Image (cartoon, rainbow, N blue to C red):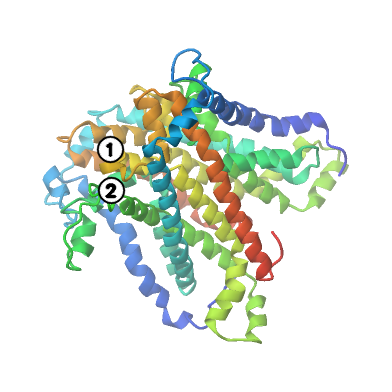
Amino acid sequence: MSAVRSRSLAGLLGPFFFLFILFWLVPLIGGLRLSLHSNTLVGEGVFVGLHHYRELMEDARYFKALRNTSFYAFFTLALILPVAVVFAHALQSLGGRLRSLMQFVMLIPGLTPPAVLALLFLLVFHGRQGLLNQWFVIPLGGQPINWLKDPDVILMALIMQCAWRWLGFMTFFIHSGMQSIPGIYYEALEVETRKAWHRFRWVTLPCLRHVILFCLMYLVVDAFALFSGAYVLLGGSGGTADAGLMLVSYTYQRALAFGEFGSAAAMSVSVAPCLLGILGCVVWISRRWAFKSGGHKV
Amino acid sequence: MISHNGPSHRSFERWYWGLWVLLPMAGLFVYPFLWMFLSMFKGNQEIFQPTSLLPDQWDLAHLRRLLAGEWFPFWRVLGLSLFMAVGQALGAVVLTSMTGFAFAKLRFRGRSLLLVACLFTIVLPRQLLVVPLFEWVHSIGLHGSVWGVMFPGMVSGLGVLFFTQVFRQVPDAYLETACLEGVSEWGAYRLLLPMLGSCLLSYGLIHFILAWNEHLIPLVVLGGAEQQTLPLALASLYSSSLRFPYAALMAGSFVAMIPPMVFFLFSYRRFRDALSNVILS
């Protein structure tokens, strides 16, 4: 291709990267700067160095939030992905029109504002009359569980809500991925084996690698950015004994309820390497895995 | 439907086992929404019996009071939400498709660096940067303005990656022809756009839904009660009072679901095909 004229290049890239710098890069740097200054909202704070970070290291609530969020991220993944793969196969077994309908129905929860969902789930999780108690816990012979008050189950309730919300979308992605696998792969494998498990293990799963990676990343980032669900469901706090305290809710609380901007910024900044580390691991594992199972490198 | 060559179209198809798995799930997915819809006719006492579905009497009073703006200026809030979500989606589609085109079809220095920068906006979403974002938006005077929500929302790394992938699939031959005709890069981009209608629509749809559902950024940037989006208004209603008729909340939630659902219904088929063509290739 001929040399690109710099004027048109600037025209194409300029607007996006202008906003990128203004509303992503500057806040990021601002966050770094803020985290090194004392907690004042108006005007320049005093430079305090790593004080806020040291404070964080001693803040039990911060670690609680970090633990809750990681726990939440891990279990939503462990719950959603396998079920989504099963559901995608189930969808595959349905005929055209029925399949479209099912797909659409499953996508509805993902389309709904999280604030609305939280409202709905208030009644699903309600201590006595909630659906979960009335339909599942009591018929199975258990005592009604107060899902949103009992510190042992709050996180479970949040995880269930997340699974319910994203299951349809993940199924949708994985199903689309399955459809784009060329049939010839299966025919080739049929020469060697006819077991359904082998077809899944040696064709479907390796071909779905990219899609599953995408789903993984989406869910991890979504878990770390979780706000609305937990905020509305638990009335803006971390719930009983902070059992449902999430990183973003805690940051929000520190900054806008207590006015401690420096500490809040330090918290945001400290999450970044964690999240990058986790995602890096995910990508690294999936590459190794691809290499082992004989797929071409990503 | 793209193709019929997916897995398991042989051994399982006759048994419709999927139906047995999916039907109960579909029930679980639909029931809460059905219940929400029917709850807007109910009184508080009835609402707290989530296992009973049908209302005793079909009482539209709560919906009417909500629409009349008894608790918050309903139509203004709805209009503002729509304006912000649509504007943000349009802006994001235009900006990210331009960027994606440049990444996919033009060779220039620093290309991979910029691409990595876009990746970072996905990995570190602005929700995590909310505190410094708030401070920054405040200091450049966009606090309380819809632009303070919309501009940050347009910085979508996901969109850039999506459109990079889309434009990669367009054969280079089109561009070479355009170059021979003496069309500039900008002109080539505009020539290609009409070919990508469903991709533009799909991304617009996704972004609209994300923007419509966003809670934290509007909460922080808009501050105050004069300007609210619908999810915000509902959330603050909910926390305001316990004597409040829940039916109105249910009605409001139902209204909040309508725009994404309607947009999605209209573009579902194109959305599905475009996505499975792009993300998965």
Dot 2 amino acid type: Leu
Quarter of the figure that contains the C terminus of chain B: bottom right
Contact, mark 1 vs mark 2 (Cβ under 8 Å) = no
Q: Is residue B176 left or right of residue B66?
A: right
The answer to which of marks 1 and 2 sits earlier in the sequence is: 2
Q: Is residue B11 left or right of residue B70?
A: right
Q: Residues within 10 Å of mark 2 (few under 14, many from 20)?
A: some
Identified at 34% across, 26% down, the residue is: A257
Q: Are marks 1 and 2 on the same chain?
A: yes
Q: Which residue is mark 1?
A: A235
Identified at 68% across, 38% down, the residue is: B98
Residue A188 can be seen in this image:
yes
Q: Secondary structure at mark 2?
A: helix
Quarter-of-image position of residue B109: top right
Where is A55 relative to A75, above or below? above
Q: Nearer the viewer, residue A85 or B45?
A: A85
Residue B141 can be seen in this image:
no
Where is B208 relative to A185, above or below? above
Identified at 21% across, 50% down, the residue is: A126
Q: Secondary structure at mark 1?
A: loop
Between disc 1 and disc 2, the foreground one is: 1
Q: Which residue is mark 2?
A: A120
Please report, as a chain letter, where disc 1 is located: A
Quarter of the figure that contains the N terminus of chain B: bottom right
Q: Nearer the viewer, residue A50 or B34?
A: A50
Quarter-of-image position of residue A138: bottom left
Residue A135 in the image, given as x and y percentages of width and height? 21, 63
Dot 1 amino acid type: Gly
Residue A191 in the image, given as x and y percentages of width and height? 66, 87
Please report, as a chain letter, where disc 2 is located: A
